[in-house]
Image (spheres, rainbow, N blue to C red):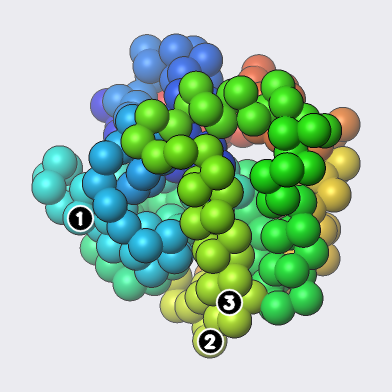
Amino acid sequence: MSTILFLHGALGSSSQFESLINKLQDSYSCQAIDFPLHGNNSVVSEFTVPHFADYLIQTIEEQYSGKVAVFGYSMGGYVALYAAALRPDLFDCVMTLATKFNWNEAIAEKEKAMLNTDEMERKIPAFVEQLKQRHTQINWKEMIHQTALLLDDLGRKNWLVNDKLKMLSLKVMVGLGDKDVMVTFDETIEAYKQLKFGSLYILPNTKHTFEKVDEKLLITLMKNFFGE
């Protein structure tokens, strides 16, 4: 039975994949990983793509004897591809959803503008409460602060440039929702074009939020990509 690792996005946790994994566990050996200080993970780490990639690599080395497949949502897809470029011997294939590939200082500043804790408490209190419940190892405001630092780092250095995508010799499928306002068609298509063994998918009537994804459609695409 094939192994699939599920990687969450920024501010997310492994718990977001529970419903999807329940529907896939008869076909695959599934594990959802929390990045350091996310969810219930007490491991301390800087919030940067290289540090999260190192954690992913270490996890695979310690827990798996062969190559693994990865499904990475948003930041999770970015980290997976960066890690796969560093250690292709550990990865069988990577499928991403809603991963943003185009980063610079202006884009990072735009995304950071939404990480104002006072505004979040006032405008989206339900999401704030969700963050408090989701992350047990770090105060939610510190989570927001560290995520802002992650965006700063991405703005200064887009870690997937310098032909890293072109280096990948494994199967990669990148995708996004057609109503995603954070990730653009152009950057996703450009990433797809750089991949040696790449494919591309678009989810109809789908925004960035993972919980709003049509699971039935996503599972069909996943089984086609990962095999049954």
Quarter of the picture holding the N terminus: top left
- Of residues 172 and 22, the one drawn nearer to the viewer in this rendering: 22
In the rendered image, which quarter contains the C terminus? top left
- At mark 3, the secondary structure is loop
Q: Amino acid at mark 1?
A: Gln
Closer to the camera in the image, 59 or 29:
59
Observer able to see residue 124: yes
Tag on residue 162?
Answer: 2
- In three-dimensional space, the C-alpha distance between marks 2 and 1, rounded to whole angstroms, equals 24 Å
Dot 2: what SS? loop
Label 3 and label 2: CA atoms lie apart by: 9 Å
Judge the density around disc 3: few (<14), some (14-19), many (≥20) Cα neighbours within 10 Å: some
Q: Amino acid at mark 3?
A: Asn
| Mark 1 element type | helix
In percent of width and height, residue 224 lies at: 55, 34
Q: Which mark is residue 158?
A: 3
Depth check: 3 or 183 in front? 183
Near mark 1 (Cα within 10 A), the count class, few <14, some 14-19 or many ≥20, is few
Q: Is residue 193 visible?
A: no
Q: Which residue is mark 1?
A: 58
Q: Earlier in the sequence, mark 1 or mark 3?
A: 1
Instruction: Kindly identify the residue that appears in the image at 45 percent across and 65 percent down.
Output: 49
